[in-house]
Image (spheres, rainbow, N blue to C red):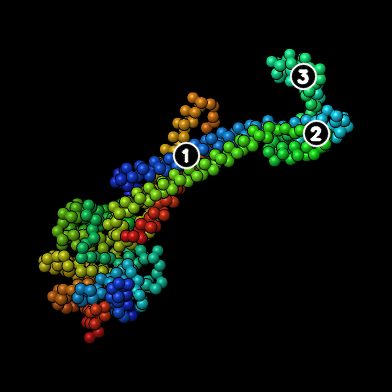
């Protein structure tokens, strides 16, 4: 499903940010990717999303290899991978439902299909009542829920969450992580990057991968 | 639908810049239109002259009848020649008296007829062009008893030159305006891309195809080009009406020319946009 094989990534000015990283994420898994700031978590996420290509090694996502997929085909992977970020990346001048509808419009759904689907997605993240609210009027936790609804719009097989609770308070964090578990219970895999060890400790059933200075130093499954 | 909506929103977002893009495309096409109008009318004049073109072969007074008959026969055998008619000195004088009645006294007082005998060569329709006329003239000039061959060469040459100068001026001025228009369209698109950078990020994030991302901008360019084409057509038509009413009679260009102008504007808009998008989207 997602497989990294001896992946290294080097930037011209920063040098190597990932070195020889290998792991295999199976269908329906819940994985925490942890490590200090600058350990390579976001780079790993970007490589899985094919926003970047590895300097060496191979990233395989849903059967697509980073060595073979062309820039013109990357959209096919992105429609199968949902993404959530620390800074939400919502369109501020639009309502919650417009933000979710935008994804469906981009992927070519008709207006007739979009409406009910947006309502279902906002219902799933507990925001039915706020579908008409402008995103910049929502709380951080609510904005992240809109971002999750948007990430789920294309029915992805995996949800990538890059420090999704970084800007949230304790209560909102708990709510978002619980939401991820609910989504995971439907069979969707979740890969969540976080440096919050306390949060990871509260979820002992999840698999944990730890990066340190660009190297994979711990995999709970390998124990 | 999304692409059309977004392209139209560009006109609301930056009306001045989009209007300027259209105006520049319009001016470029207006220059092309003006010279096109002039070239078209010159072409009509040339065709009309070509329809009437004939070669007059003036003969020396001492040319013998047998030699004249031989030349007449040789010229008649040329495929493009329809008819060769002999005009005697006497007939030439009678024509001159008829055509120039103000000189009747002068002609009647003449003791010797100064006008030469000649052969008038008429051409078949479709063969009245410069190349054929020149070839026939050269053949006739080769005979030693031929004094001169005339076909109004200076006028034909001047019209042809004028047409060439018109086409060259159109290309240079039109090209310069098109270049400026391309720069303005590129600037307008850069601003549009910058204004929509968040949307473009999200589109990429959720798997929009490159075509989907680019289409609104291409449509925006096409619309600016279309408006420019229509503006050029309107300006050229106004000039045509003005010339027709106050200066002299000119013909309006065929509908196919107008369609070509407007579609050229659109195509130009799309082309300029495609180049700009390619460059600016990479910067995001």
Number of other residues with Cα within 10 Å of mark 2, as a class: few under 14, some 14 to 19, many 20 or more: some
Number of other residues with Cα within 10 Å of mark 3, as a class: few under 14, some 14 to 19, many 20 or more: few
Mark sitting earlier along the chain (2/3): 3
Please report the residue visible at 58 percent of the width from the left and 41 percent of the height from the top.
Answer: B164
Give the x, y percent position of residue A120: 23, 58
Please report the residue visible at 25 percent of the width from the left and 74 percent of the height from the top.
Answer: A40
Q: For the residue labelled by badge 1, is the local secondary structure a helix, a strand or a loop?
A: helix
Q: For the residue labelled by badge 2, is the local secondary structure a helix, a strand or a loop?
A: strand
Horizontally, is A84 left or right of B119 in the view?
A: left
Give the x, y percent position of residue B83: 77, 32
* Disc 3: which residue: B94
Mark sitting earlier along the chain (1/2): 1
Horizontally, is B284 left or right of B269 in the view?
A: left
| Numbered disc in front, either 1 or 2 | 2
Q: Quadrant of residue A184?
A: bottom left
Alpha carbons under labels 2 and 3: distance apart: 22 Å
Q: Are marks 1 and 3 in contact (CB under 8 Å)?
A: no
Number of other residues with Cα within 10 Å of mark 1, as a class: few under 14, some 14 to 19, many 20 or more: many
* Disc 2: which residue: B146
Q: Is residue B266 above or below residue A46?
A: above
Give the x, y percent position of residue A128: 18, 56
Please report the residue visible at 15 percent of the width from the left and 61 percent of the height from the top.
Answer: A140
* Disc 1: which residue: B31
Same subunit under labels 1 and 3?
A: yes
Screen quadrant of the C terminus of chain A = bottom left
Alpha carbons under labels 1 and 2: distance apart: 48 Å
Alpha carbons under labels 1 and 3: distance apart: 51 Å
Q: For the residue labelled by badge 3, is the local secondary structure a helix, a strand or a loop?
A: helix
Q: Nearer the viewer, residue A49 or B19?
A: B19
- Looking at the image, the residue that sits furthest to the bottom is A223
């Amino acid at each position: 499903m997602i497989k990294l094989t001896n992946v290294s990534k080097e930037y011209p000015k920063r040098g190597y940010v990932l070195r020889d990283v290998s792991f295999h994420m199976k269908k329906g898994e819940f994985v925490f990717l942890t490590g200090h700031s600058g350990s390579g978590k976001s780079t790993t996420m970007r490589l899985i999303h094919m926003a970047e290509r590895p300097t060496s090694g191979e990233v395989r996502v849903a059967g697509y290899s980073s060595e073979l997929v062309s820039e013109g085909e990357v959209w096919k992977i992105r429609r199968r991978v949902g993404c959530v970020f620390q800074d939400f990346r919502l369109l501020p001048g639009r309502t919650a439902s417009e933000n979710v509808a935008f994804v469906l419009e981009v992927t070519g759904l008709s207006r007739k299909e979009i409406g009910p689907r947006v309502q279902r997605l906002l219902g799933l993240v507990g925001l039915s009542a706020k579908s008409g609210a402008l995103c910049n009027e929502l709380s951080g936790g609510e904005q992240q829920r809109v971002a999750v609804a948007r990430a789920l719009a294309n029915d992805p097989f995996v949800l990538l969450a890059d420090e999704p609770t970084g800007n949230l308070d304790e209560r909102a964090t708990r709510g978002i992580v619980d939401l991820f578990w609910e989504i995971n219970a439907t069979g969707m895999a979740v890969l969540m990057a976080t440096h919050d060890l306390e949060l990871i400790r509260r979820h002992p059933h999840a698999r944990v991968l730890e990066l340190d200075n660009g190297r994979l130093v711990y995999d709970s499954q390998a124990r | 639908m999304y692409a059309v909506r977004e392209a139209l929103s560009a006109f609301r977002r930056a009306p001045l810049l989009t209007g300027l893009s259209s105006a520049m495309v319009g001016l470029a096409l207006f220059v092309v239109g003006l010279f096109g109008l002039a070239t078209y009318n010159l072409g009509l004049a040339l065709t009309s002259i070509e329809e009437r073109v004939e070669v007059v072969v003036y003969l020396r007074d001492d040319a013998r009848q047998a030699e004249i008959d031989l030349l007449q026969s040789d010229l008649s055998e040329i495929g493009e020649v329809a008819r060769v008619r002999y005009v005697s000195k006497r007939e030439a004088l009678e024509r001159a008296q008829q055509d120039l009645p103000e000189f009747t006294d002068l002609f009647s007082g003449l003791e010797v007829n100064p006008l030469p005998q000649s052969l008038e060569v008429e051409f078949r329709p479709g063969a009245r062009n410069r190349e054929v006329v020149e070839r026939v003239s050269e053949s006739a000039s080769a005979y030693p008893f031929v004094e001169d061959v005339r076909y109004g060469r200076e006028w034909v040459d001047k019209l042809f030159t004028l047409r060439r100068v018109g086409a060259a001026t159109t290309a240079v001025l039109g090209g310069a305006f098109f270049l400026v228009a391309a720069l303005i369209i590129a600037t307008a698109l850069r601003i549009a891309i910058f204004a929509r950078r968040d949307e473009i990020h999200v589109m990429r994030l959720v798997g929009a195809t490159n075509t989907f991302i680019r289409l609104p901008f291409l449509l925006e360019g096409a619309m600016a080009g279309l408006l420019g084409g229509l503006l050029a057509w309107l300006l050229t038509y106004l000039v045509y009406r003005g010339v027709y009413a106050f200066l002299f009679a000119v013909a309006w260009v065929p509908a196919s020319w107008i369609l070509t102008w407007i579609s050229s504007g659109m195509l130009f808009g799309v082309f300029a946009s495609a180049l700009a998008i390619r460059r600016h989207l990479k910067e995001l």
